[in-house]
Image (cartoon, rainbow, N blue to C red):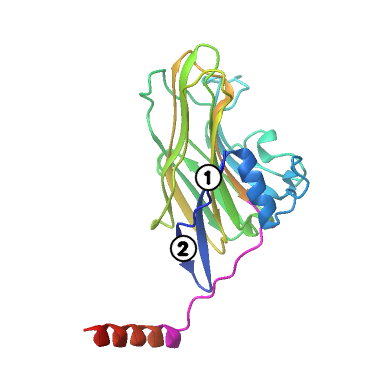
Amino acid sequence: MKSTWILLSLACVPAFCTTIVGHVGNDAAFNAYMQGLGVPGYQNLPAVDYTYEVFSAQGRIGNNQIGPGNANNEIGLHWNNPADATPPSSSGPLTGIGSTQRVWGVAGFNNAIVEFRIQRLGNTVTFTFGPLGTPLYQASITDVYVGDVTMLGFRSRAEANGSMTSNQASLTNMLWNGVTAIPDSDAFDNSLGDGSAVENVVVKDIVGDFTLTGRTVLNWTGNRPNNSVLAWQIKAFRGVPIETIENPEPSSLLLAATGLALLIWKRK
């Protein structure tokens, strides 16, 4: 399947612009995109070295249970510490406020939408799942590598198998610094036995502090899925080359505006 990479918008910060790339397709297309950017760890595909994936905020169906002694986690912030070739989500979620276990709902596509927030301030990142005042889960990481993060990847995965007839994992209504819209990462699978539906969205050229907000939902019909058959991740990468787009100097903007005004006057 041919994937199309779309440059959607720029959310400018001093001296640089954060690039909202948009959809890059399934996992194979995402890996090829990373290789094309020159990201360390993606140069020997199909093998991937996750040393440069700093953290991952994740939600998955797990075993859809809650309570003490339940080893299967459904929500969490995962940290690649110490940094190695395995993905952060291979480690357990960090403890913090609230529970890493969650009942997502019942079958029938009537599951509740839950808000989330990821904020970086210097070398600290905080992931909040649920309302800010009374979060269902919240955890933070402080690490020099957090400050080096220049790219986020948004991945959703849904797989219909067995007696499940359709699944959906979505990251929606996402805003960058409260202003710039990020495309949904919405994976929907209603065809049994055809593998999984995977969608990846990318934001790159990140410089400085940021706040990302959005909503999540997991839905299914038929029997409840398990583990990571239904899941979403927000993955943070360091070592991704930045395209430095300088903000125009005020004099350049004035010159361009004057030229445009003269052109319009001439046409009239």
Give the side of residue 17 with respect to residue 107, left or right: right
Identify the mark at residue 127; answer none if there is no mark: 1
Quadrant for residue 81, please give it. top right
Q: Earlier in the sequence, mark 2 or mark 1?
A: 2
Count of marks, rendered view = 2
Numbered range of the magenta stretch = 237-253
Query: Which residue is located at x 65 percent, y 59 percent?
Result: 148
As helix, strand or loop, the secondary structure at mark 1 comes to strand
Using the image, determine if residue 20 lies above or below residue 77: below
Give the side of residue 64 with respect to residue 33, left or right: left
**Is residue 109 something one can see in this rendering?**
yes
Give the side of residue 125 with respect to residue 144, left or right: left
The residue under label 2 is 10
Q: Position of residue 100 (x, y in %)?
A: 55, 31
Q: Residue furthest left?
A: 268
Is-magenta flag for residue 81?
no
**Quadrant where the C terminus is found in the figure:** bottom left
